[in-house]
Amino acid sequence: TAETASTATDVEEGQRLFQANCATCHGPNAEGTSEAPSLVGGGAAAVDFQVSTGRMPMQMSGPQAAPKPPQMDDEQTAQLAAYVASLGAGPAIPTEQQVDAELGDSANGALLFRTPWATCHNAVGAGGALSEGKWAPPLDEVSEQNIYQAMLTGPQSMPVFNDANITPDEKRDVIAYL
């Protein structure tokens, strides 16, 4: 993963990127502000999800960060993730094997998807409206890695599905279904 492959230089460059792009909202030490949450202990997976989908940095405040073209390239995203990971333990970026749909059981994934996710994302992952101007996005064009990372980190209104309540194999099954 990007987190385990990071170097001190990656962390330093990630800190520079953080100061230039994130500190205004998340605070100079990533401790959070009234505008944005603390990132200490947030983990590399949360950063990779938010930045690679273009949700962060946000263009403007609102009920939910919308996906848009990413403002950082893959290397910068990995460096920023390495910096945030250095601030405290949190979910790591999943491995290729963890997100490989070919290794999953799509029938089991369909059963798992029905209960927690279909309520918001629709039975086929088409997305839908939530309360207070928020929405569950469609999942048809989301990468396998970002589906897994969303389960791990619970972005926006989504709850966290850690490994204690949805195992890594079950997460891969859901990816196979989608």
Image (cartoon, helix red, strand yellow):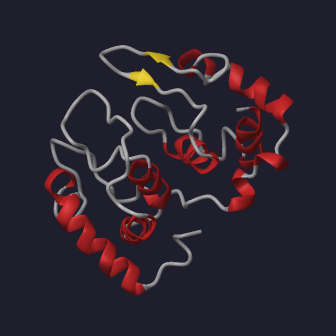
Residue 156 sits in quarter:
top left
Please identify the quadrant where the C terminus is shown: top right
Please identify the quadrant where the N terminus is shown: bottom right
Vertical position of residue 86 compared to residue 124: above or below: below
Instruction: Choose between 87 and 123: the one closer to the eye.
Output: 123
Residue drawn at (66%, 62%), measured in percent from left and top? 95
Residue 122 sits in quarter:
top right
For residue 90, say whether it is visible. no
Residue at the bottom extreme?
8
Instruction: Name the side, left or right, on which 86 lies relative to 18.
Output: right
For residue 60, say whether it is visible. yes
Residue 96 in the image: state x and y as whole percent.
Answer: 69, 60
Instruction: Choose between 2 and 30: the one closer to the eye.
Output: 2
Residue drawn at (48%, 27%), measured in percent from left and top? 137
Residue drawn at (84%, 49%), measured in percent from left and top? 103
Residue 61 in the image: state x and y as whole percent.
Answer: 19, 35
Residue drawn at (23%, 44%), measured in percent from left and top? 36
Vertical position of residue 47 compared to residue 88: above or below: above
Residue 123 sits in quarter:
top right
Q: How many marks?
A: 0
